[in-house]
């Protein structure tokens, strides 16, 4: 199979334009994500189902981007800080 030859300049342009770094692009399984949040499996699924933690479906497998974990933690910290100030 012959793949199109993309010049190094063009490849570099796409890489520089990518908005995610390698760590943020890492996909976690549900078990890996729940371990990082120290919650149970059912709580993790609730967080994904209510949209608190973003996830994607690849085939029949659910994956959570690492940056979604960071976003969830930041949102929880912001929410708790607001409640503490009121």
Image (cartoon, grey):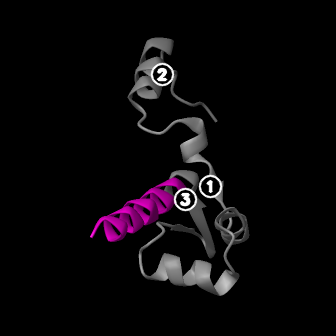
**10 Å neighbourhood of mark 2: few (<14), some, or many (≥20)?**
few
Q: Is residue 29 left or right of residue 10?
A: right
Q: Quadrant of residue 43?
A: bottom right
Rounded to the nearest angstrom, the CA distance separating label 1 from label 2 is 23 Å
Residue for point 41% across, 62% down? 75
Q: Which residues are magenta?
A: 69-86
Distance between the Cα atoms at labels 2 and 3? 29 Å
Q: Residue at x 65, y 65 (%)?
A: 33
Residue pointed to by mark 1: 27
Nearest the eye: 9 or 82: 82
Q: Quadrant of the C terminus?
A: bottom left
User: What secondary structure is the stretch in magenta mostly built from?
Assistant: helix
Which of discs 1 and 2 lies nearer the camera? The answer is 1
Mark 1 or mark 3: name the one nearer the start of the chain: 1
Relative side of 78 to 61, left or right: left
Identify the mark at residue 69; answer none if there is no mark: 3
Quick check: 67 above or below 22?
below
Label 2, on which residue?
Answer: 11
Question: Which element is circle 1 on?
Answer: strand
Residue 76 horizontal/vertical position (percent): 45, 65
């Amino acid at each position: 199979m012959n793949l199109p030859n993309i010049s190094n300049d063009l490849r570099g342009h796409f890489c520089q334009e990518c908005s995610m770094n390698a760590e943020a692009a890492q996909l976690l399984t549900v078990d890996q994500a729940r371990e990082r949040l120290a919650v149970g499996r059912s709580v993790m699924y609730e967080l994904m189902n209510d949209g608190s933690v973003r996830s994607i479906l690849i085939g029949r497998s659910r994956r959570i981007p690492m940056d979604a974990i960071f976003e969830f933690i930041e949102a929880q910290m912001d929410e708790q800080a607001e409640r503490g100030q009121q």
